[in-house]
Amino acid sequence: MEESINVLGEPLQTCSGSPVTGFYRDGCCNTSDADFGSHTVCVIVSQNFLEYSRFRGNDLSTPQPDFGFPGLQPGDRWCLCAQRWLEAHQYQMAPRVVLSATHRRALDIIPLDVLKTYAIDLN
């Protein structure tokens, strides 16, 4: 696992413990080379984003009990794939971002200035 540093260069904060998120299901957007999807962007999902994601083939709102996935509701925090977030941004459907809980590896795909325009945790 890579060092747990956020996009601001500080220690990575927890994204969500309920529902438990992250590639490692540790509540954080931690990553490694095994995380091909780069589940590094901590978002607060909106109804619009959930509908957009379902339309794009990734239904995040339907529970999947066999995988321990409760389904997401608007307002839930979730570690989203950086490429999916960028795609949603390009279609003006991107959800808000928690920078303190977004792993620095997201910057390999998304410029920090773009993430900042969606941030909920900047002064």
Image: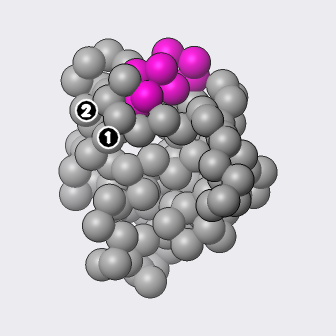
Alpha carbon of mark 1 to alpha carbon of mark 2: how far? 5 Å
Q: Which mark is residue 87?
A: 2
Element marked by disc 2: helix
Q: Any magenta on residue 115?
A: no
**Tags 1 and 2 touching, CB below 8 Å:** yes
The residue at 45%/47% (across/down) is: 80
Q: Nearer the viewer, residue 74 or 119?
A: 74
Q: Residues within 10 Å of mark 1 (few under 14, many from 20)?
A: some
Query: How is the protein colored in the picture?
Result: one colour
Specify whether 46 is left or right of 27: left
Pointer 1 residue: 84
- Determine whether 40 is above or below 82 in the image: below
Query: Which part of the image, by quadrant, shows the N terminus?
Result: bottom left
Q: Which residues are magenta?
A: 46-54
Q: Quadrant of residue 38?
A: bottom left
Q: Is residue 31 above or below residue 53?
A: below
Query: Which residue corresponds to the image point at 41% horizontal and 38% vertical from the top-left?
Result: 58
Furthest residue in direction front, as rendered: 66
Q: Quadrant of the C terminus?
A: top right
Total marks in image: 2
Name the amino acid type tagged 1. Arg
Which residue is rendered at x = 51% and y = 26% of the image? 50
Question: Is residue 74 found left or right of 40 in the rendered image?
Answer: right
> x, y (%) of residue 60?
54, 38
Q: Amino acid at mark 2?
A: Glu
Q: Nearer the viewer, residue 15 or 5?
A: 15
What kind of secondary structure does the magenta stretch mostly adopt?
A: helix
- Mark 2: give few (<14), some (14-19) or many (20+) Cα within 10 Å: few
Q: Nearer the viewer, residue 13 or 26?
A: 26
User: What residue is at 70 percent from the left and 53 percent from the top?
Assistant: 65
Give coordinates of residue 12: x percent, y percent. Answer: 56, 64
Q: Tell me if I can see residue 123 in this picture.
A: no
